[in-house]
Image (spheres, coloured by chain):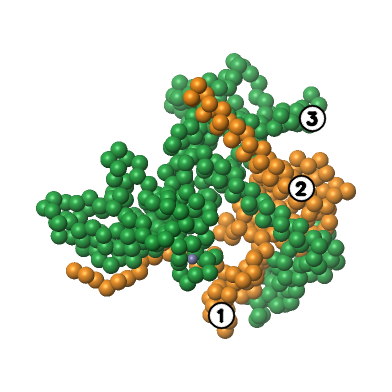
Chain colours: A green, B orange
């Protein structure tokens, strides 16, 4: 059979399709179809690691007579989900004009508890009090999702023990630290019958009976008995299960995820189009210009260079005269491209 | 037992990620100095971090050895999230002969994209078109998601 690229494009001309199968305050399950796995995976990755939320980043401990070490408590505080509504319009502390932190780039929370009774006292997220100005009334408030309305347990105090501290919650992304993750988990699944054989199922005697079918197994046609393997098949339907940690509602996570991806792209396009007009690239990162400069002038030789550069005959240790790996001082002398 | 006030940083931040970009070497190229060198400027780098933010750092650049129709780009602070989707969408462009991406080293936040085009378009144009195509794709998926959510909500209340 001749390869006809139009056959593939036919399905794609319909464009991506989204179908939601479950949506509530904690999770959204949806199917993305007619999209490529590379895009579906980008969406998954961006939702996991790059959506800005807010989490405690700085803890000033005034008094701690509990059995737990300051650092241990500070770490626990960092992991408490805080409401990230409007965190988007919060500034990153490192980009704010203020010294240290202010209401435009942080939320201040205080915790003061003393066990005055004769039974052990539980200190939980409910006891954290947002203080000072905030960009809105929701951002930075601890998420309380349990029936008792207590929120996550931070520590316990024996009679007479006391904890007094102040926290600074800052905006961040999960790529830097997992405490900024908006999602508790993101389910990502395709090809429930493993027709593409991307999975190699371990089994005792029979993989079919030992592995439970996916919840999406009924959504797709099971393979026929003795069906030949389709070498041209690619995954086309992707099943997402976005579970929120409470700081952002699940459908906001999807929306924000795409937004982050868009911003990434917009930034790069801006850079590319800006670089085109200008004379450009004298420094390393001053933008791509039309590559009309003479090949070889930079010591990289003409013609094809591998994407890893060094197409010429330089030793990978730089300095042309260098005989030892460390060459002559200063290292890399004679390289004109820096 | 009241104690002296002290600051506990919740997590040590990654100092390495703050190095000014103009200090950073190209992928797979030798550092202009290495750990064994004695560099009188070594300490200045720390202070430069404070000054660094005045200008937006450039996130894409053309690697040496590129020609108009066959170019390699280096992206800073990008990874598989952008790389794979970009590779796919650029390869969909019929004017593109070849496109691939690589992350040369896992501990360097750099992603390289190689684009080779047929006559009539340049690698830079193909890259820009690729980026815009993903943007359009994002727009469509956003609309479809909002649509679908509304339909789902209507289905529940009905
Ligand atoms: Zn500030």
Q: CA distance from mark 2 to mark 1?
A: 41 Å
Q: Secondary structure at mark 2?
A: helix
* Direction left: furthest residue: A118
Asked if one can make out residue A324 in the rendered structure from this viewpoint, the answer is no
Q: Give left or right: position of B114 versus B148.
A: right
* Direction bottom: furthest residue: B40
Whole-percent x and y of residue B115? Answer: 76, 51
- What residue lies at 29% left-to-right and 58% top-to-bottom? A111
Is residue A206 depicted above or below A42 in this figure?
A: above
Q: Give left or right: position of A286 versus A175.
A: right
Is residue A245 depicted above or below A201 in this figure?
A: below
Lower sequence index among marks 2 and 1:
1
Is residue A269 depicted above or below B14 in this figure?
A: above
Q: Which mark is residue B129?
A: 2
Q: Which mark is residue A37?
A: none
Q: Is there one chain holding both mark 1 and mark 3? A: no
Whole-percent x and y of residue A16? Answer: 66, 33
Q: Residues within 10 Å of mark 2 (few under 14, many from 20)?
A: some
Q: Which mark is residue B44?
A: 1
């Amino acid at each position: 059979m001749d390869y006809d690229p139009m056959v593939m494009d036919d399905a794609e001309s319909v464009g991506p399709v989204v179908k939601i199968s479950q949506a509530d305050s904690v999770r959204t399950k949806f199917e993305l179809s007619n999209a490529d796995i590379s895009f579906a995976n980008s969406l998954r990755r961006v939702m996991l690691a790059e959506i800005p939320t807010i989490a405690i980043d700085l803890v000033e401990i005034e008094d701690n007579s509990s059995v737990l070490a300051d650092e241990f408590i500070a770490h626990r505080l960092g992991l408490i989900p805080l409401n990230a509504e409007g965190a988007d319009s919060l500034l990153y502390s490192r980009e704010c004009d203020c010294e240290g932190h202010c209401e435009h780039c942080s939320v201040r929370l205080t915790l003061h508890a003393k066990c005055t009774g004769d039974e052990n006292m539980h200190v939980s997220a409910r006891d954290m009090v947002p203080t000072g100005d905030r960009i809105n009334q929701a951002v930075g408030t601890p998420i309380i999702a349990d029936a008792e309305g207590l929120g996550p347990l931070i520590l316990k105090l024996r009679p007479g023990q006391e904890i007094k501290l102040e926290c600074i919650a800052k905006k961040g992304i999960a790529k830097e630290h997992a405490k900024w993750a908006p999602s508790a988990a993101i389910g990502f699944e395709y090809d429930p019958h493993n027709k593409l054989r991307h999975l190699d199922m371990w089994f005792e005697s029979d993989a079919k009976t030992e592995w439970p079918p996916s919840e999406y197994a009924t959504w797709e046609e099971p393979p026929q008995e003795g069906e030949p393997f389709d070498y041209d098949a690619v995954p086309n339907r992707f099943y997402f299960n976005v579970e929120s940690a409470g700081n952002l509602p699940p459908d906001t996570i999807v929306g924000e995820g795409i937004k982050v991806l868009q911003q990434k792209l917009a930034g790069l396009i801006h850079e590319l189009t800006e670089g085109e007009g200008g004379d450009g690239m004298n420094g390393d990162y001053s933008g791509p210009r039309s590559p009309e400069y003479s090949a070889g002038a930079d010591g990289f030789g003409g013609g094809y260079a591998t994407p890893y550069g060094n197409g010429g005959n330089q030793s990978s240790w730089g300095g042309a005269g260098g005989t030892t790996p460390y060459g002559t001082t200063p290292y890399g002398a004679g390289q004109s491209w820096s | 037992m009241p104690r002296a006030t002290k600051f506990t940083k919740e997590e040590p931040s990654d100092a390495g990620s703050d190095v000014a970009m103009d200090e950073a070497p190209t992928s797979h190229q030798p550092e202009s100095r290495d750990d064994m060198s004695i560099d009188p400027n070594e300490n200045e780098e720390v202070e430069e971090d404070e000054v660094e933010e005045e200008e937006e750092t450039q996130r894409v650049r053309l690697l040496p050895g590129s020609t108009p129709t066959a170019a390699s780009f280096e992206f800073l602070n990008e990874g598989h999230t952008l790389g794979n989707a970009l590779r796919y969408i650029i390869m969909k462009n019929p004017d593109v002969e070849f496109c691939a991406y690589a992350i040369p080293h896992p501990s360097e936040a750099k992603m390289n994209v190689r684009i080779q085009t047929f006559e009539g378009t340049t690698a830079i144009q193909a890259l820009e078109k690729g980026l815009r195509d993903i943007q359009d794709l994002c727009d469509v998926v956003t609309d479809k998601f909002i649509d679908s959510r509304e339909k789902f909500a209507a289905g529940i209340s009905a």
